[in-house]
């Protein structure tokens, strides 16, 4: 019988530390069955004291969140880390692009650790720098390059943020995408009276956030949006389509939020009276159209916290967060929007054994799994991040 050597990591066994694909962890992890894991994590954190600051993204497992000094979305966490310059080590319980952002926003003496390097983000991985640079050149060849402003979602690698910094673009979050798009369009002359000309946005990596924001917040039509497929010549689009488009959406999506379906929303409404559908804008446009409320992770949390007892919700975001909200609010009925959608597999790679291993290594004087963005990338990415910080309004995301 022939055996096939299937890779075990869902995103591949890359060796490029700067890629969202991640790599295998080199260390000796404690077994998940070790009954002392909780005690070991506690002891290691106590031994490190103020030298370590543990960040926990909302989508992390409970066993990890328990040891987080602060929880939040990725941008809030990066800012929290920057506000703790006395912390020598930032242990980021989240995914790779988040740890990169924390490294960019923290001081050079602070070291950012990602407990499992295989914790990447499949969405961020859908826009690689070489693909984006090829697209940029193709847009110039098609004669529309001068009209385009690049806008990247926070959920992208540091080199994509740096690309935006170098090319007059900006980073956005799911809370400020509308403001970021308005800023981007304002960078170019407006369209003429006949509707021709005017600026365009190349939005990556999440087509759904781009489309939902352009149509529902900026009042564009679906015809104003085209999808750029990086695997096809000129993105699979004609020069005329590119000339007419206002939003050029990268063909990327979140492998969790992209799986919720409009059919499930319909059947829930038919079977659960008074249920309110609350979803993240990374969901597809047809799901968002059928939802009662749409917003970032922080918006979802705030909405549930402010809701009266007896409220009934079906929530379309990552399962760890929905389960936590349901536990924290027994006075409400809180359900996950779709029973066939699973956890974010890469977020879930950060578990207690990896956290214990990372913390105990720090106690022993070894920094494992350090995320260190190179100086040139950091400098350019900061340009795009600062443009975002200068936008008015909230900046919570993911
Ligand atoms: S939930 Fe989606 S966007 Fe967030 S880390 Fe997972 S794959 Fe990436």
Image (tube, grey):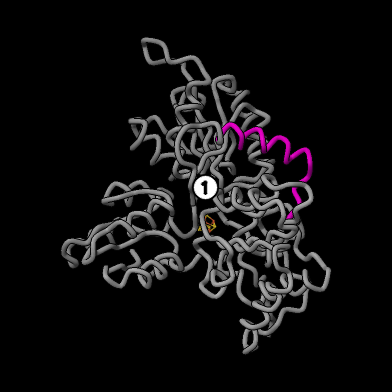
Give neighbour class at mark 1: few <14, some 14-19, many 20+ (Cα, 10 Å): many
Q: Is residue 187 magenta?
A: no
Q: Nearer the viewer, residue 264 or 188?
A: 188
Q: Is residue 378 magenta?
A: yes
Figure check: 52 above or below 170:
below
Q: Give percent across and percent down for residue 293.
A: 30, 50
Q: Nearer the viewer, residue 162 or 19?
A: 162
Left-right relation of 11 to 277: right
Q: Which residues are magenta?
A: 371-388
Q: Could you tell me which residue is drawn at 54 percent across and 20 percent down?
A: 147
Residue 267 seen: no
Q: Which residue is mark 1?
A: 252
Figure check: 338 above or below 388:
below
User: Which quadrant of the structure image shows residue 331?
Assistant: bottom left
Q: Give percent across and percent down for residue 70.
A: 56, 60
Left-right relation of 161 to 214: right
Q: Nearer the viewer, residue 367 or 185?
A: 367
Q: Could you tell me which residue is drawn at 33 percent across and 30 percent down?
A: 219
User: Which quadrant of the structure image shows residue 376?
Assistant: top right
Q: Residue furthest top?
A: 193
User: Which quadrant of the structure image shows residue 146?
Assistant: top right
Left-right relation of 195 to 361: left
Figure check: 380 above or below 303:
above
Q: Give percent across and percent down for residue 145.
A: 59, 23
Q: Could you tell me which residue is drawn at 50 percent across and 63 percent down?
A: 59
Q: Could you tell me which residue is drawn at 73 percent across and 55 percent down?
A: 371
| Helix, strand or loop status at disc 1 | loop
Q: Residue furthest right?
A: 365
Magenta segment, prevailing SS (helix, strand or loop) = helix
Residue 94 seen: yes
Label tally: 1
Q: Image quadrant for the N terminus?
A: bottom right
């Amino acid at each position: 019988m022939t055996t096939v050597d299937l890779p075990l990591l869902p995103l591949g066994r890359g060796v490029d530390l700067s890629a969202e694909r991640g790599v295998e962890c080199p260390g000796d992890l404690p077994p998940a069955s070790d009954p002392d894991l909780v005690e070991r994590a506690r002891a290691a954190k106590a031994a490190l004291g103020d030298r370590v600051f543990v960040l926990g993204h909302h989508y992390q497992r409970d066993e990890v969140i328990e040891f987080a000094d602060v929880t939040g979305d990725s941008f809030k966490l990066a800012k929290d880390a920057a506000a703790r310059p006395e912390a020598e080590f930032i242990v980021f319980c989240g995914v790779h692009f988040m740890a990169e952002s924390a490294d960019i926003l923290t001081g050079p003496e602070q070291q950012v650790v990602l407990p499992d390097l295989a914790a990447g983000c499949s969405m961020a991985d859908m826009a690689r720098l070489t693909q984006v640079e090829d697209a940029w050149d193709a847009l110039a060849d098609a004669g529309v390059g001068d009209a385009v402003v690049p806008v990247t979602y926070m959920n992208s690698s540091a080199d994509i943020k740096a690309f935006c910094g170098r090319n007059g673009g900006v980073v956005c979050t799911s809370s400020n995408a509308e403001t970021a798009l308005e800023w981007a369009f304002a960078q170019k002359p407006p369209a003429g009276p006949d509707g021709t000309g005017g600026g365009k946005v190349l939005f990556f990596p999440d087509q759904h956030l781009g489309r939902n924001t352009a149509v529902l917040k900026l009042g564009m039509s679906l015809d104003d949006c085209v999808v750029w497929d990086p695997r096809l010549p000129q993105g699979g689009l004609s020069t005329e389509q590119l000339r007419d488009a206002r939003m050029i959406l990268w063909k990327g999506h979140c492998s969790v939020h992209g799986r919720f379906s409009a059919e499930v929303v319909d059947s829930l409404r038919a079977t659960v009276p008074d249920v309110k559908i609350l979803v993240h804008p990374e969901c597809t446009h047809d799901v968002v159209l059928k939802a009662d409320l749409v917003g970032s992770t922080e918006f979802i949390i705030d909405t549930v916290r402010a809701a009266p007892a007896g409220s009934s919700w079906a929530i379309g975001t990552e399962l760890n967060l929905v389960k936590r909200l349901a536990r924290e609010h027994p006075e409400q009925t809180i359900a996950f929007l779709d029973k066939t959608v699973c956890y974010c597999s890469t977020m879930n790679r950060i578990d207690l054994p990896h956290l214990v291993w990372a913390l105990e290594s720090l106690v022993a004087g070894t920094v494992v799994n350090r995320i260190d963005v190179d100086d040139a990338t950091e400098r350019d990415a900061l340009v795009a991040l600062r443009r975002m910080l200068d936008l008015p309004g909230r900046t919570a995301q993911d």
